[in-house]
Image (cartoon, rainbow, N blue to C red):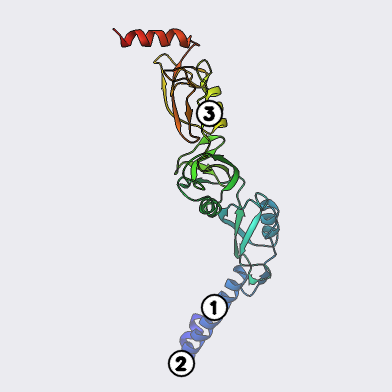
Amino acid sequence: MFKFLARQPFWINLLIAFVLLFLLGYLFFKSLNWLTNHGAYLKVPAVKGKKVDEGIKLLETQGFEVVIQDSVYFESVPKYTIIKQLPEADATVKANRTVFITINRAVPPLIDMPKLEGLSFRYALDKLEKNHLKLKDTIYRPDFMKGSVLEQQYNAVRINAGAKVPWGSKITLIIGGGLQAAPVLVPDLEGLTFAEAKQLLEAKGISLAAVIPMTTVKDTANAFVYKQNPERLDFDNEPVYIQPGQTMDIWLSPTSLDPDSLRKKDNQDLFQ
């Protein structure tokens, strides 16, 4: 073969070289098309609305790679549901194309509790909705800030702005109901537990101000009231009245004490 080529004119050898290069190039590109499935196209199946496992299995059996691109949360959509796919359903793409999917999370994300206290009730409702929260209940309390949010509660406990709560949580709002014209009798809180006293004050529309426990008090909720301000009776032994929305102070003891003996002791201290 070499002797044959050596006896041929140069231009013939050059032509043979070009032909061989062309054939090699043609075979290379043909094999490349075969290896990469060039020219093979598939239609993307619809997986939106399907469960993640079901959707991934369907895509992979039809020759697609699958990547979970993102996860979001919608309360109205079942968990682990595919809510978005890219490319979209029925798109024609090359074989082995990657399909990106977005799924609905199983657990709602934590979000910041907004500041609602001091806002009007309507504005607070709007802010709750924009922050993906719901209104659980409204409780009206006598207060001069009529129609304004006095307190925001989550699970019956006051919650500060910025605290983390689950998406879709239900929030209770304490709303100012204005001050009533008729005064109410100062209730007798002495001898009651803190929890009982707080419940009684709320029923009468009286706000609790200072709570002063003894140093030995460990459990405030079950501590006993042994002193209150204002007192139930004045110096002339006449009942004391206050306006709804006004405040009272209470002093707490770990055990139930005799208020009369404490009152005598306080009076004795005044004259020493």
Kindly report which numbered mark, 1 or 2, lies closer to the viewer in this rendering: 1
Depth check: 123 or 103 in front? 123
Q: Residue at x 60, y 68 (%)?
A: 35
Q: CA distance from mark 1 to mark 3?
A: 96 Å
Quarter occupied by residue 272? top left
Residue 23, horizontal then vertical, whole percent: 56, 81
Residue 177 has which mark? Answer: none
Q: Check disc 1: other Cα within 10 Å, few if <14, some if 14-19, many if 20+.
A: few
Disc nearer the start of the sequence (1/2): 2
Quarter occupied by residue 107? top right
Classify 174 as above or below 262.
below
Circle 2 is placed at which residue position? 11
Disc nearer the start of the sequence (3/2): 2
Whether tag 1 and tag 3 are in contact, CB under 8 A, the answer is no
Q: Check disc 3: other Cα within 10 Å, few if <14, some if 14-19, many if 20+.
A: some
Circle 3 is placed at which residue position? 201
Q: CA distance from mark 1 to mark 2?
A: 20 Å
Q: Check disc 1 and report its element: helix, strand or loop.
A: helix
The amino acid pointed to by label 1 is: Leu
Kindly report which numbered mark, 1 or 3, lies closer to the viewer in this rendering: 3
Disc nearer the start of the sequence (1/3): 1
Residue 134, horizontal then vertical, whole percent: 59, 48
Classify 212 as above or below 69.
above
Residue 24 has which mark? Answer: 1
Q: Check disc 2: other Cα within 10 Å, few if <14, some if 14-19, many if 20+.
A: few
Depth check: 30 or 48 in front? 48
The amino acid pointed to by label 3 is: Leu
Depth check: 226 or 7 in front? 226
